[in-house]
Amino acid sequence: MKVSSRTLSAIAAFLLCHTAEAHIGLSTPAQPIAATTQELSFLVGHGCEGLDTYRIEVQIPEGVGGVRPLDSAFGRAVVLKDDTGRVKAVTWTKPEANVLPEDTQFYKVTLRASLPNAPFTALYFPTIQTCRAPDGTEKVAAWVGTSGEHGHLAEGSTELPAPSLVVLPPRTPGWNKYTVTQHVHDLSVFKDAQIVWAGNAAYSPSEYISGLISKEPNTQVLQQIHPGTEIWVRY
């Protein structure tokens, strides 16, 4: 197949653009188990078009409580609350004198919060990244896309994806029985499980076990889980 120079240029521009706009990640030191308190770290790998990151505003979704931010390279965080006292957003702002002449740093801001008792629910934390040039010029990247499910944007969305995580149910070593109340199409939420069974369908993050599943008579490969499905998961 022959590809035109215009098409190649468009592909190159797409790749360069999306490499420069690497997403803001969200990590936790432990599995995000429902109804537990977690440290949530927001990882800022890049600034905006070569400018240093100056401010990070993380919006807190409904159901997340007990928010306590940690100080960072940006200094002390500012907490915004609604009329009921619930924390709506946390903002970290770098002193103007500390803004770097260009985008060279990796940043991490962290808060402590209680997750809701809502297993298999995706939580989105829309985040506004503001970058600043030494002359005071600012650029903003709004990481607010929540149009998909479980941390994935809907096909064709032009929004930058909001940092997100999927709340997992409590578990014990061995077999665990759950009734799923949310549609789970991304089975990577079971990345630390040995195997997942739903009726006569099974899934495993292990390539070896996945191979056995595909060869097992009268057994299907589990690809998604619908609400109301009873599953067995071995950890």
Image: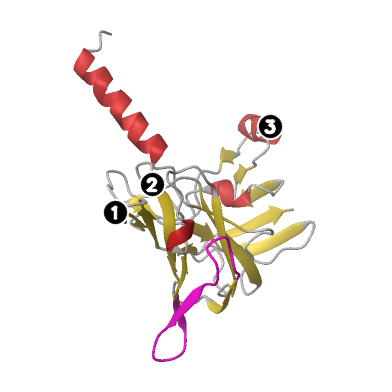
Question: Is 6 situated left or right of 55 in this image?
Answer: left
Q: What stretch is highlighted in magenta?
A: 70-88
Q: Mark 1 points at which residue?
A: 137
* Upstream in sequence: badge 3 or badge 1: 1
Vertical position of residue 149 compared to residue 178: above or below: above
Report the predominant secondary structure element of the magenta stretch: loop
Badge 2 amino acid = Leu
Question: Is 103 situated left or right of 69 in this image?
Answer: left
Q: Using the rendered image of the protein, determine whether residue 198 is visible from the camera's viewpoint.
A: no
Query: In this orientation, which residue lies closer to the viewer: 2 or 91?
Result: 91
Residue ID at (55%, 44%): 222
Give how far across and how far down residue 45 sits, in percent: 50, 46
Report, in whole angstroms, how far the alpha carbon at label 3 lies from the one at label 1. Answer: 58 Å
Question: Is 54 situated left or right of 204 in this image?
Answer: left
* Upstream in sequence: badge 2 or badge 3: 2
Q: Name the residue under label 2.
A: 51
Give how far across and how far down residue 55 sits, in percent: 42, 62
Q: What element carries label 2?
A: loop
Give how far across and how far down residue 64 sits, in percent: 52, 75
Badge 3 amino acid = Leu
Whether pointer 1 and pointer 2 mark residues with C-beta atoms closer than 8 Å, the reply is yes
Q: Using the rendered image of the protein, determine whether residue 115 is visible from the camera's viewpoint.
A: yes
Q: Which residue ends up furthest to the bottom in the rendered image?
A: 84
Disc sitting over residue 212 in the figure: 3
Report, in whole angstroms, how far the alpha carbon at label 1 lies from the one at label 2. Answer: 9 Å
Quarter of the rendering containing residue 130? bottom left
Query: In this orientation, which residue lies closer to the viewer: 77 or 200?
Result: 77
Q: Which residue ends up furthest to the top in the rendered image?
A: 2
Q: What element carries label 1?
A: loop
Vertical position of residue 203 compared to residue 41: above or below: above
Badge 1 amino acid = Thr
